[in-house]
Amino acid sequence: MFETGTAVIGAGFIGPVHVEALQRAGVTVTGILGVSDEESQQAAKNLCLPKAYSNLEEILSDNKVQAVHVATPNRLHYEIAKSALLTGKHVICEKPLAMNSAESAELVRLAKNSGLAAGVNYNIRFYPLCLQAAEMVRAGEVGDIYSVCGSYIQDWLFSPTDYNWRVLAEEGGELRAIADIGTHWLDLVHNITGLEVEAVCADLKTVHPIRRRPTGEVQTFKAKEQSKVVETEPVKITTEDQGCVMIRFEGGGQGCLWVSQVTAGRKNHLRYEVAGSKCALSWCSEQPNDLWIGHRDRANEELIRDPSLVSDTTRSFISYPGGHNEGFGDTFKQCFRAFYSYIDAGDFSAPPPFPTFADGHREIVLCEAILTSHRENRWVELKGGSK
């Protein structure tokens, strides 16, 4: 059991995922704050939490709260994270960290000067076989990285009648598919390979420039589950549904990312393939307990998620024996365990074992370069890399 008390801000799709993972990790959740008193009360009841907060100020003034989790719409991330840091609270924020790089850079500075732990929930890092892939690269088993290709594709916005706040630029930012799911891939690839992005060239597309917005809001992923006909109104969409990004890494490696939220049948499908001078690695989030290892001169291998077969570092993020599969919710638990173990250890000069605000800033800088590349139809270099 960790000593830090935590409040969760956001009671939509992802906030309750945080609550469940925190409880499984042994973190005391003091309560939750939604968009209204009704939502807060209902979420507290459903999640068996002791308190439904009425506003942010109540959380920040609660002495039982030493950390906050920000799981709100994107436009609120900056102000909430800033306020929490300034009142002495540790912070874990959903991605993107902020709406632009000026805001995220300020949050990085605040976090550095605060002496507090500040993380971004790039949970996909914590699939054990992604951690194992990173260990293999660092140990020299993959060799020099020639290329990294892959995709992150979904179908939850497949139809023009599919709608959620995330499609609106004023709520989620000018980029959507890239910022919402593409940044998970970019962060994951950086964590595995250690490669910094030197330049990008992007081609993005809004497949449905007009969507039908229900007169009442719907939760993320929930609209397609509803069978009844609801009243809608047309709304103009400027954020992208899909797109391709070519990547040039520092040191000469190449990359290519395809992102889509309109690919039928793909529910939540992240894939990467790393080609090195010694072997290749491939992994897919919909079969997360298998890592493919490709060879030129001998049979290929498939490593299963088994604590007896992986490195010591990877083993520390596995809870169950081989064959007892772990998935999406477990990655949140392991990310939060890393975060709160770091707080409990008390040595903030040590390298953080979780994605930091600096990592969140890197992805926003990348997003802005990708958007510029798309709009200006050219390669865009990142000054000093994506750091």
Image (cartoon, grey):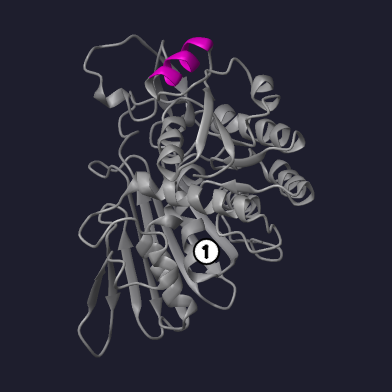
Q: Name the quarter where the C terminus is drawn.
A: bottom right
Observer able to see residue 277: yes
Residue 59 covered by magenta stretch: no
Give the residue displayed 56% in from the left and 48% down from the top.
340
In front: 28, or 366?
Answer: 28
**Of the residues shown, which amino acid type is indicated by label 1?**
His
In front: 246, or 339?
Answer: 339
Question: How far across and how far down the image is residue 351, in percent?
Answer: 63, 63
Give the residue displayed 32% in from the left and 45% down from the top.
268
Question: How far across and how far down the image is residue 385, in percent?
Answer: 66, 65
Question: How far across and how far down the image is residue 375, in percent?
Answer: 58, 47
**Residue 148, picture quadrant:** bottom left
Give the residue displayed 31% in from the left and 67% down from the top.
307
Q: Main secondary structure of the magenta part?
A: helix
Q: Does 373 appear above or below 5?
A: below
Residue 43 covered by magenta stretch: yes
Residue holding disc 1 = 190
Q: Which residues are magenta?
A: 37-45
State the SS at label 1.
helix
